[in-house]
Amino acid sequence: MNAGKMVEGKVVVVTGAGRGIGAAIARLMAQHGAKVVVNDIGVSLAGEGGDQTPAQDVVNEIRKAGGQAAASYDSVAEFSSAAKIVQCAVDNFGRIDCVVNNAGILRDVIFHKMTEADWDAVINVLLKGAFNMCRNAADHFRKQESGSFVHMTSTSGLIGAMGQTNYGAAKLGMVALSKNIAIDMQRFNVRSNCIAPVAWTRMTASIPAKDPAAQKRVEQRKQVTAEHNAPLAVFLASDAAKDVTGQVFSTRKNEIFLMSQPRPVRGIHRSDGWTPQACAEHLLPALRSGFYPLDRTADVFSWDSI
């Protein structure tokens, strides 16, 4: 491996790569020697419309810089169309080595006003879309006994956010998807990891700043460009990360965090078993001090990105 080219010769598919974080990852993958499939159907944040320009623009940028890239305009939300994205890599570059599941849409609304359509649209693109991409790539990875998945998750799921029940559920679902893929496919030298990114993008710009504190966060967030998230994704796709799997990271400008995974905090036992009344009288006072507050991302990451 060329010391300056972390993913030299690898074939990488990046979904939702026409703009923002996906485009930044695609460009850096190419700079580090990867052949990149830039997948983007060019829809609005809500998943409407369609435009081939964003993906083609990124492909043109990569080629102009001397890299190799191909555009894909198929949707991750349908299993058969996700298969075409994977096949695009094989047809153009002969193989596939990494899938970066970055495609996403937003349908933010307070839960009691959320419609079934709001829920289904987000779950289909984020969670089902990630499954579709992984499952279609898995056959190739198994046969070649190598491969890497990088899933872009969110603190909306890891911690919590207002008005993002659908988005948070899908993003946390991606974490469980990743961990279980890592377990099932370890025997084939296939790795799977998550990144919860932070950046000022078209997606975050759409979230309204309703108070002075939120407006201040917005101004600070504008300094955190999408490019800050790309180096970790390139590393995770590389052979240098061959021993890294089943992990969840978060990136904030120049900070990288390893995120915790659910484990028992403490336990209690009654030899005669439990009743509802015993839960009230014994469980509640014993465990209450360990309860998690209704934190949101800004409560846990209470400082500006560094």
Image (cartoon, rainbow, N blue to C red):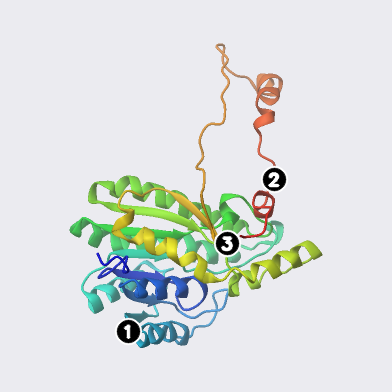
Identity of the residue drawn at 36% across and 66% down: 79
* Distance in Å between CA atoms under marks 2 and 3: 22 Å
Residue extending furthest front?
3
Relative to 107, is 236 on the left or the right? left
Q: Which mark is residue 119?
A: 3
Name the residue carrying label 1: 66
Residue 259 visible (yes or no): yes
Q: Is residue 231 left or right of residue 302?
A: left
Front disc: 2 or 3: 2
Dividing the picture into quadrants, the one containing residue 65 is bottom left
Which of labels 3 and 1 is toward the front? 1
Q: Give the mark toward the camera: 1 or 2.
A: 1
- Residue sitting at 51 percent across and 47 percent down? 259
Give the image location of residue 243, x and y in percent.
Answer: 32, 48
Residue sitting at the far top = 272
Q: Where is 280 relative to 11, above or below?
A: above
Real-space Cα separation, disc 1 to disc 2, in angstroms:
49 Å
- Which circle's residue, 3 or 1, is located before the other in the chain? 1
Crowding near pointer 1: few (<14 within 10 Å), some, many (20+)?
Answer: few
Q: Amino acid at mark 3?
A: Trp
Q: Secondary structure at mark 2?
A: loop
The residue wearing badge 2 is 294
